[in-house]
Image: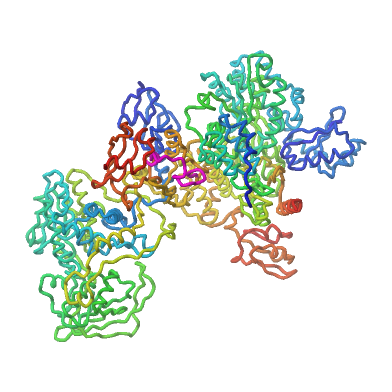
Amino acid sequence: MINLTINGKQIQAPEGATILEAARANGIDIPTLCYDKAVEIYGACGLCVVEAEGIPKLLRSCSAKVMEGMVVNTESDRVVRSRKIAMELLMSAHDGDCVAPCQLNCPAHTDCQGYVGLIANGEYDAALELIKTKIPLPASIGRVCPHPCEKACRRKNVEEPINIAALKAFAANIDLNKGESYTPELQEKTGKKVAVIGGGPAGLTAAYYLSIMGHEVTVYDMMEKMGGMLRYGIPQYRLPKEVLDKEIALIEKTGVKLVNNVKLGKDFTVESLKAENDAVIVAVGAWKSSSMRTPGEELEGVYGGIDFLRSVIKGNPFAIGEKVAVCGGGNTAMDACRTAVRLGAKEVYVVYRRTRNEMPADALEIEEAEEEGVIYKFLTNPLSFNGENGKVKSISLQIMELGEPDASGRRRPVPVEGKTEEIAVDSVILAIGQKLVQGDVSELKLNDRGNIEADPDFFTTSVEGVFAIGDATNRGASIAIEAIGEADRCAKVVDAYLNGQSLDTRVPYISKRDEATIDYSDREKASRITPKVLPADVRNKSFDEVSLGFTEEEAQTEASRCLECGCREYYKCKLLNVAQRYDIHPERFKGVMPQKYTRDENAFIERNTAKCILCGLCVRSCKEVMNLSSIALHGRGFTTDVTTAFSLPLNETNCNNCGLCVQLCPTGSLTEKSTLKKQVPLDETYTEEFVDIDGKKASVLVSRYHGIVLRVIPNDEISRNAGLSREDLMKKITG
Amino acid sequence: MEKTTVDLSLLSDVLNEYAAVKGSLITILQHTQEIYGYLPKEAIELISDQTGIAASEIIGVATFYTQFRFEPVGKYLIMLCQGTACHVNSSELILETIKDELHIEDGETTEDGLFSLKCVACLGCCSLSPVMMINENTYGSLTPEKTKKILKELREAAV
Amino acid sequence: MRIVIGQGSCGIAAGAEKVRKALLNTDINAESISITGCIGMCYLEPIVDIYDDDNKLTRLVKVSEADAPAVAAYIKTGDKTMIEKLIVTDEDSEFLSKQTRIALRNCGIINPENIEAYIEKDGYTALKKCLCDMTPEEVIEVIKTSGLAGRGGAGFPTWFKWNAARQSQGEEKYLICNADEGDPGAFMDRAVIESDPHNLIEGMLIGAYAIGASHAVVYVRAEYPLAIKRLTNAIAQAQEKGIIGENIFGTDFSCDFMIKAGAGAFVCGEETALIESLEGHRGMPRLKPPFPAQSGFWRKPSNINNVETFANVAWIINNGGEAFAAMGTEGSKGTKVFAVTGKVKRSGLVEIPMGKTLRDVIFDIGGGMKTDKEFKAVQMGGPSGGCIPASLIDTVIDYKALGATGAIMGSGGMVVMDESTCMVGMAKFFLDFTAKESCGKCIHCRIGTKRMLEMLERITKGKGKEGDIELLEELCYSIKDGALCGLGQTAPNPVLTTIKYFRDEYEAHIRDKKCPAGECSDLIEYSIEADKCRGCTLCAKNCPVGAISGTVRNPHIIDTDKCIKCGKCFTVCKFGAVKKA
């Protein structure tokens, strides 16, 4: 035995062992990408480098042998620097998306590609469960979300984005309408108590995930029912409250205690809750309508947008008369004008200082409102609300035009000198935003915008043990999914806090393709499908839900349009795993990609050389283990490629489908197709099982997700050389 | 250029001599290229068959070395030296001149099949830089005018 | 009378073969005309040496076919007036007289195609001495005394490698000569093989005897057809004489000899890549250890040395290790051959004792600049080396002293540059080379050299940004540390040395978008100086984009918006009226 020291630890290793073997045998992990016991040592990736005292060069630990008295450091600054640059260089030439842009653009990082793919495959339960790992209120959110995911969806470059939000609602509806809806498995009780102030999307989400993690959670809310703005700020025709009730009931089922009609500052304080709990999360929202600072706002008949919507939901609608002007261009403005129509107003105007193109509201909402009779007054801005006897009678409007783009990139509206207009109204609804009611949170430090100052990643506030999320914090009111994303991450942070730890919830490095280089010309066009809606002349008189939701056929067809941007190997990508260990910035070395992004498919393997990192494992195993050399390294230098003779498709070569190359590929350059019709990146489990092949016991790897067998992969000499098709192997497992 | 049918019998002497000698792949490929002017697909398949080396590996070796070609070349193969001394003595101008005169890029062959252009590693005639080799002959101390003249003469000689 | 024509590749390229044919067409007795290899005065080729009956030499230089009758007349009459202009000047003669030749001792003197010519020069006496009078250990001891170090670039002590291979267990061992001279700008190995192939064979056989190898292999670049031809011929002659084969000189020592031609891959100069290539594989370096001395060609103990190293061996055996060690410095013994090229007046092969200075080579022997521009830098060691600036011209030729500049001794390429060479462009040139020659195995070299090249391309196009120099440096050090083999580990040297000595030039490209040397086409502008322009219209006729306007006999003007900076006008103008700035 040889005695040596690795990272200060005295260890023994057999003579002839490599440093890598010695380290691993002692639980010291050294990253590698080109090393595998199945094949000869290669030394290409250079990630396994270590520093040894007295040796000036870095050693590749995969090949350097242990020596008596050697002192090795596997994590010295020099080693880390070398690995970091190696990874930066490697990733600068790795052309692939780890996850799809839809997921990245979702503030809650919902795995859109995952559930859309599962829906395409008819796996609705699995889809719902996947959604619920990020959103506890999917039926509600699927209906109201302005879906940033769809803005990022690359299908827009073919024709139109996937209707992701409606697909989410589809999967959630199925679950809600089942006898027994999905409830997650609860972890063991921790005995820790958490109070959540505010029962809106943020508070409920945080409560749900903390409860699953075994904590005792109570949600306190000032209104008579839970749901916050989802209940009191969104009209019934868009989100039926029965749907919200059912989802809240499922949250309650996880053990969350819901307490209504109690108000912060009146019935309790942050301090008093802190005294009774191990942590407090403040998610009080933004419940005050913003002012336009226009003369006449104080007149009777001038209402705040969310105040108006709440009055309707509570059953005591404000008196709005026959002529209503709604000021604003966002979704609240749309909710207000369409609600006004449904209350029987004859003339409903939307006053907006830019044009339709700049409206922040969802395009579909804008269109549906118009169908329902709403009149748009684009390029107008209220100068004053004019009253008579203290009651609003008309609005004076300044006519605007579009000038130069502003910081947001939208063209700035500028007044047209001397051009004004006056319209007669019975009421005015100001839907231009909402703010935190500051007095409620006087115990916490506010920022200069008047919102609670919370760390954007750790959600901590000025008071230790008190966390804050959602509309009440930092930049103020935003969309529900934003609050839900924060709540999900905050739950993890609080869980860590309760365990005396700290958790960084920032998204670690992932590989992204350069959008400008993507070619869509080979994609067949297929139009986006939108769920059917009630006819305009029916819905403008009723608060029934406008959208009829997807039929199963519609949902599957729509989901099948997904381009599958995210990498199938995401969950087991060794390359990504190593990349995320180091603080890497490959954009420093941005340059041309060595290979074109192509997909070469055979019966069960898909090759994409653009993702190849030239570790050589596939080529070497094909030669050294299988003695086939169906693939080889071609060319040299930067553009070296792994390919077949004469670039033939794999199934025209001597490849015997053993799949070893795929198994050894440390990234998504080689992937084995699953049994699913639509290939979805899923967090599968792999188990070794044994099957009978010609009377011999052969090892296979079986991958499953949600009980579905996705792959059966040969795992020893017998199964690799049996020449069985994947279907035959599959039958041996599924019968 | 039209590829003619490959007469594989021309390879038999080479394969008889080297196919069984281990480590001879590069030598076999060099002889093959000498015979055909390039490495025809059919020849690679035959070499694979006779040596037992997988075709993908043979191509892997052939594509590693700059000497090997997979397409026929013109009657005159211009190899323009890319060495340091040539660089310092403006070989770039010579490259431009050849490209202008022949309307081809590095690695291409003229439509009439007369000239192929290949930029190559240092030819070792640094004192005569800039230098090019056309088939067996080396031409040194090139200037754009001299280059044009050489190309003109070769073209005339071919007609 | 003997007439000897220099027939190295350079000489032939300069027209030596045409001269030979022309001389054969005169009435000179064909028997008296013979050839020799390369004397190294490449800038004077074709060279014709005329020895009179007293063996007195008259050297004619830059001889052309048209001179053949004059030469014939001289030989007939002894009248020198006709050939006066061809006789080498005293100044040019100094190019040779100032050198000390060991490795090149027979080059350009003997007929490389005739073994007898070599034997006449005491050829194969050293081998015979070793085989008959010395043990292998004694041979290694002499080499150790000589201080001979690897001339291929790394400068590793030759005896140490031989000893390691000798000690290595194994019945079958290989002695390999690396003649894959890939450094652009170096051609001494070619010259040795073309001009004195038996010297190489003798050195190799001595090495084979010393380590106990029964097989000798030469790996020669495919770009050297003449070298391969002459070496093949020499091997056949030696075999015929029993110098190669079984029981050489009647001793127990047997050694066969084989030539393998490379196929165009610079990385095969790296010894493990060379072995992969010898075995018929892609020339991708193997991990070390194991070193070739333990496990090399066909996994057998192997020793690899470079051509020039072997070319010194016979001389050392005959003259003693002390004689060799008497030349040079403390750490660098003997002589070294340099290929001096570029903007130097006298270019060619220069062999001098270690310890001389760069100034001795470039100015004293090389004669300084051939242009009227100032000496700016000398590039040494090719893509693995670096640029040494004019301020360090007195650097001593010694492995350590040259290494301290950031460059390396390398294989001996010395490319001299004047003010018109852009140093960023020079770094780009070498990175373009290494990026193309990278085998692609390890990340640092495969992607790192490409990314460095892209950065340098951006800088030379005026698209560099603040921080680029620092990023380049960071990448350079990381590649040196992380690359698998010598090619990658040394690839950053041209960048690092140019940044070290010419940082201001990088900054000018990045900050001012200017190329001080006026070489980077994207950063220069062409204009016509009206007072110099004669209105000949030549520039306008040659402009490929019609950017030049003007009428006959009137000054022309370049439309800078249309100009693509191809430089044609600059090249064609006969009056120096086109200015680039």
Question: Coloring scheme of the render?
Answer: rainbow
Tell me the quarter of the image containing the N terminus of chain A: top left
Q: Residue at x 68, y 64 (%)?
A: C529
**Residue C244 location, x and y as percent?**
67, 22
Q: Is residue C354 visible?
A: no
Q: Residue at x 24, y 70 (%)?
A: A533
Name the one closer to the observer, A351 or A449: A351
Q: Is residue A600 inside the magenta stretch? A: no
Name the one closer to the observer, A256 or A490: A256
What residue span does the magenta drawing correspond to? A640-662
Instruction: Spot the residue most to the front.
Output: A694
In the displayed structure, A69 sits above or below A265; it is: above
Q: Name the side, left or right, on which A172 lies relative to B1.
A: left
Tell me the quarter of the image containing the C terminus of chain A: top left
Q: Name the side, left or right, on which C22 lies relative to A424.
A: right
Instruction: Spot the residue most to the right.
Output: C77
